[in-house]
Image: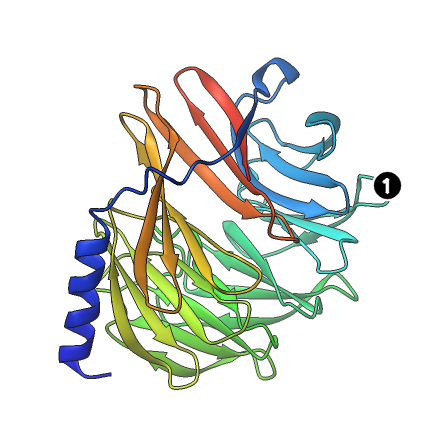
Amino acid sequence: MTKEGTDQNTNKASISKRRRFSSIRAIVAFVLLVSLGVVMLSKSSFADDFAYVLDADRNVAVISRETNTVVANIRVGLDPRDIAITPDGALIYVPNLAHNTVSVISTATNTVVATVGVSDRPVAVVITPDGSLVYVVHNSQFISVISTATNMVEATVDVGNLVAGVAFKPLVFTPDSAFAYVLVPFQGVKVVSTTTNSVVDTIPNAFVANPLAIAITPDGALAYVSEFNSAIVSVISIASNTVIANVGLDFFEPAHMAITPDSALVYMMSLQGFSGIDMSVVSTASNTEVAVVPVITEDLIVNIKSIVIAPDGSLIYITFFGFSGGGCLKLA
């Protein structure tokens, strides 16, 4: 795409971002989990009829999606930072920063079945779509690669600079599990082959310095990259590994992104809101912001921890915490 085409796309997005679609109304069911012992919610994953949510007290809370109640708590390591589930729903992986370990949970028994030792300060885990590998992001330039068949570290990837930084989602896989796209500050997006576990390409100028999050559409066509202290999201073509558009949003720092199963829409939310918080809806067809949905309207400080779309695309789960406590919003 030419610079003129990119600029036109950005201008259209700037016009679109000022529109608030009052006709869009989210059906919101508020589930207050503070009374159930969950003080601060973080990342979440799904397995069959349950959501697995990481809380602030070394527990993974098991929530029934039917009753919206916590039915079990699973103890993991010290300072857990992320949570990911295998595509078949059988295993959950949780990195424990203070213990330099990854807890492996069986969803059949809701117990920890293995503890994998990794290098220093694991902060995030991402599982390949085929379920064969777990990439463990450290607060360093290294990524540990765990085999789900053996629950052992089989490789270490060096991407040349600090991976995590301020990023909230520093790594994502293509749907065919062939490549990982890794956010590396001041260098660009590093493309890692999962066959060789090595860097095979670098996409420069996807952001200036401090990447925040990355998401790839389920059809494998596009990647969206947000940046710290910016309202612009870069759009990368997976086919060419180049930036093809920039989307202007209604707010800064979309740290959380989730894409519908049909690859049509990208839902984005910033890390924090001071007088309520909105959710941006971006069309992947036009790469413009097509709606801004008020999610939390109370006049309080709200920290968003994650956005997860249910496998059938019918519901969006948003975990958050604020001065009045933590909770989970379920939006239709």
> As drawn, is 239 to the left or to the right of 113?
left
Q: Is residue 77 visible?
A: no
Q: Position of residue 93 (x, y in %)?
A: 67, 51
Residue at horizontal 65%, vertical 17%?
Answer: 36
> As drawn, is 173 to the left or to the right of 48?
left
Q: Position of residue 101 (x, y in %)?
A: 63, 49
Callout 1: SS: loop
> As drawn, is 26 to the left or to the right of 29?
left
Residue at horizontal 68%, vertical 39%?
Answer: 51
Q: Residues within 10 Å of mark 1 (few under 14, many from 20)?
A: few
Tell me if residue 80 comes above or below residue 254 in the rendering: above
The residue that mark 1 highlights is 109
Q: Position of residue 216 (x, y in %)?
A: 47, 66
Tell me if residue 283 comes above or below residue 112 in the rendering: below
Question: For this rendering, which residue is in front, 41 or 124?
Answer: 41
Tell me if residue 274 comes above or below residue 132 in the rendering: above
Picture quadrant of residue 190:
bottom left
The C terminus appears in which quarter of the rendering?
top right
Q: As shown in the figure, which amino acid type bears the numbered disc 1? A: Thr
Picture quadrant of residue 233:
bottom left
Q: Position of residue 212 (x, y in %)?
A: 34, 54
Q: How is the rendered protein coloured?
A: rainbow
Tell me if residue 189 comes above or below residue 18 in the rendering: below
Residue at horizontal 59%, vertical 22%?
Answer: 38
